[in-house]
Image (cartoon, rainbow, N blue to C red):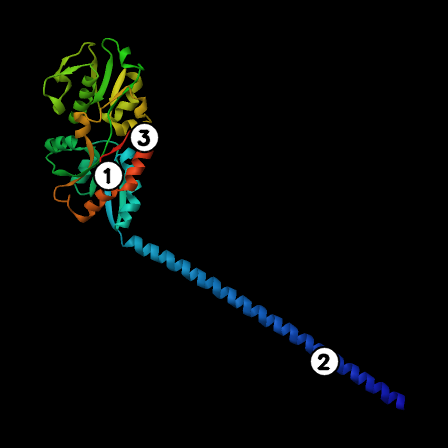
Amino acid sequence: MKKRVLGAAVLAAALAAGALTACSGTAKETTAAETAAGTSAETTAAGADAQTTEAGSEAADTTAAANLQKIIVGASPAPHAEILNAAKEVLASKGYELEIVEYTDYVQPNNALDTGDLDANYFQHKPYLDSFNAQNGTKLVSAGAIHYEPFGIYGGKVSSLDELQDKAAVLVPNDVSNEARALLLLEAQGLIKLKEGVGLEATRNDIVENPKNLEIVEMEAAQLPRSLPDADIAVINGNYAIEAGLKVSDALATEDSQSLAATTYGNIVAVKEGEENSDAIKALVEALTSPEVKQFMEERYEGAVVPLF
């Protein structure tokens, strides 16, 4: 009998110990689960905070962009549109968003400016602008000169001006101001002689001496580079030469920096009369004449574009 009582007591003690061990294990698992849940909640909260911060930053950027006043400027692709792109960040710091519309001719950007489709354009020099106004009855003015592009004589069928034969074909721009510039450069090389004092109004009809009987062929300025292989030489505007991949260093001759052309044919920002002193246009000109843009011009074009500031 005693043995049975003793066995029952031992069994009871063993069951009690087992129960305590089971409770202890459940407590540990519960604590771990709670900890994991807490950590997960913290991670989710941190992620949500990060997303909120990022969204807030994007919203701030969008708001800042929305607060910029837009300026629409027409330009030839190179170098003018490229220079404008270089000025975008500077202009944004002044509170303006720059939209660039590219043109491949010399007429449409002035027409678009005159009709109000553009706030400004940047592709021409003042003599051309003056000629355009006179021919079209427009009232467009310069808001400031930005840079100068040396005119160059480029070889087509010849690689030197000394190789020019009698009746060689010479291509020049067909608009009044640029043709005069081309003829002045030909005169500076001793290839022709113009009437005394004709200057920037010169046309091929003003040639009084032509020792080699050069055939002066007038052509739209934009067509000159692609027609160069069919001619002996061509006198090409700087921007069209750049677009065609021609380098100033490849030219057979270029305008002297002190020539009449160099001091006259600075490329300008043009606007409608009365807008030249507006805050937006002043900001545009300031951005284009900033140290950042000057550095861009000098490094990018290696002498094909010369800052005038």
Give residue 75's position: percent from left, percent from top: 25, 37
> Where residue 71 sits: x, y (%)?
23, 46
Q: Amino acid at mark 2?
A: Leu
Residue 197, placed above or below residue 212 = below
Label 1–label 3 contact, CB within 8 A: no
Q: Amino acid at mark 1?
A: Gly
Residue 176 shown left or right of residue 158 in the figure: left
Secondary structure of the residue carrying tag 3 is loop
x, y (%) of residue 5?
85, 89
Residue 207: quadrant of the picture: top left
- Image quarter for residue 257? top left
Q: Residue at x 30, y 23 (%)?
A: 226
Write down the residue under mark 3: 302
Pointer 1 local density, CA inside 10 Å: few below 14, some 14–19, many at least 20: many
Residue 152 appears in the figure: yes
Task: Tell me the crowding category of disc 2: few under 14, some 14 to 19, or many 20 or more residues within 10 angstroms, Cα based.
Answer: few
Q: Which mark is residue 74?
A: 1
Label 1 or label 3, whichever comes before in sequence order: 1
Determine crowd level at label 3: few under 14, some 14-19, many 20+ residues with C-alpha closer than 10 A.
few
Considering only order in the chain, which callout, 1 or 2, is on the residue closer to the N terminus?
2
Observer-nearest of 183 and 111: 183
Residue 267 image offset from top left, x and y in percent: 21, 34
The disc, 3 or 2, on the residue closer to the chain's N-terminal end is 2
Identify the residue under disc 2.
Answer: 20
Q: Which mark is residue 17?
A: none
Extreme residue in the front direction: 258
Query: Disc 1 or disc 3, which is closer to the eye?
Result: 3
